[in-house]
Image (cartoon, helix red, strand yellow):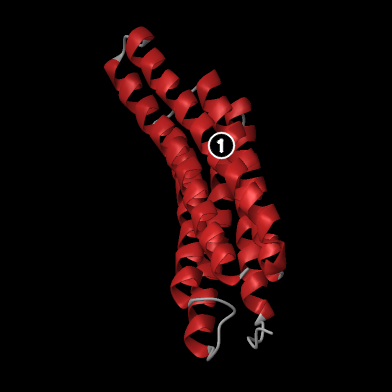
Amino acid sequence: MRLIPKEEKFFDEFEQGTSTLVEAANLLLGLLKDFQDVPRKVAALKDLEHRVDGLVRETTERMNRTFITPFDREDIHALISQIDDVADFIEGTADRILLYRVQASRPEAVALAEIIVQATTATHETVARLRDLKGAGDILRRCGEIKSLEEAGDRVHREAVAQLFEKEKDPITLIKWKEIFENLEEAIDRCEDMAEIIEGIALKHA
């Protein structure tokens, strides 16, 4: 029998963090599908990113106060840091759209945002299973699905950049969209990083 008491608040914070990522991803997708009221949508995404920042601080402080954590401290720190990174890249994408005064979306950006929605949703569902590490098989399967989404995102990103260099004649527009595409891909990549951390935790404690 494993004699490690569970500090449930850690799990609450992980789930709150990934739930906020799902909310942010859907808001970003809505922005990319409909370029109406962009400043308000960007402001809302900044609020969600600040909410994640607060959770990171709370989790770090809790970790420093807690004598026995539910799993390794380095894993807790890595997981909450990746949640923060995904929020940063989602908000950073929206911020660049506003800053660069982008007037219309591109289908490749919508496709990448749809993958972010799928990846954050899968990550949230997987994080929720960390409360009971007996279901390691299910966790590992879900982590595999997130990795497959990252591969799909990589393919869409490569095609998006290739199309950009082939068809975009304005160099300033090309630079703007290349950076936006990179931010979208980074958000997906960090979801995969989260999956690898969760996978490691499951294998250690199953």
Is residue 193 depicted above or below 151 in this figure? below
Count of picture labels: 1
Is residue 133 visible in the rendered structure shown here? yes
Residue lying at 44% horizontally and 27% vertically, measured from the top left: 157
Q: Assign the C terminus to one quadrant of the image.
A: bottom right
Q: Position of residue 105 (x, y in %)?
A: 53, 22
Is residue 203 depicted above or below 74 in this figure? above
Q: Position of residue 137 (x, y in %)?
A: 67, 55
Q: Nearer the viewer, residue 9 or 102?
A: 9
Left or right: 111 with respect to 85?
Answer: right
Instruction: List the single residue furthest toward the left.
Output: 171
Q: Position of residue 175 (x, y in %)?
A: 31, 25
Q: Position of residue 200 (x, y in %)?
A: 51, 61
Is residue 105 visible in the rendered structure shown here? no
Is residue 68 depicted above or below 165 in this figure? below
Q: Assign the N terminus to one quadrant of the image.
A: bottom right
Element carrying mark 1: helix
Residue lying at 63% horizontally and 86% vertically, measured from the top left: 4
Residue lying at 53% horizontally and 91% vertically, measured from the top left: 67
Residue lying at 66% horizontally and 60% vertically, measured from the top left: 136
Q: Nearer the viewer, residue 198 or 7?
A: 198
Residue on which the image places disc 1:
148
**Residue type highlighted by circle 1:** Ser
Q: Residues within 10 Å of mark 1 (few under 14, many from 20)?
A: some
Left or right: 84 with respect to 141?
Answer: left
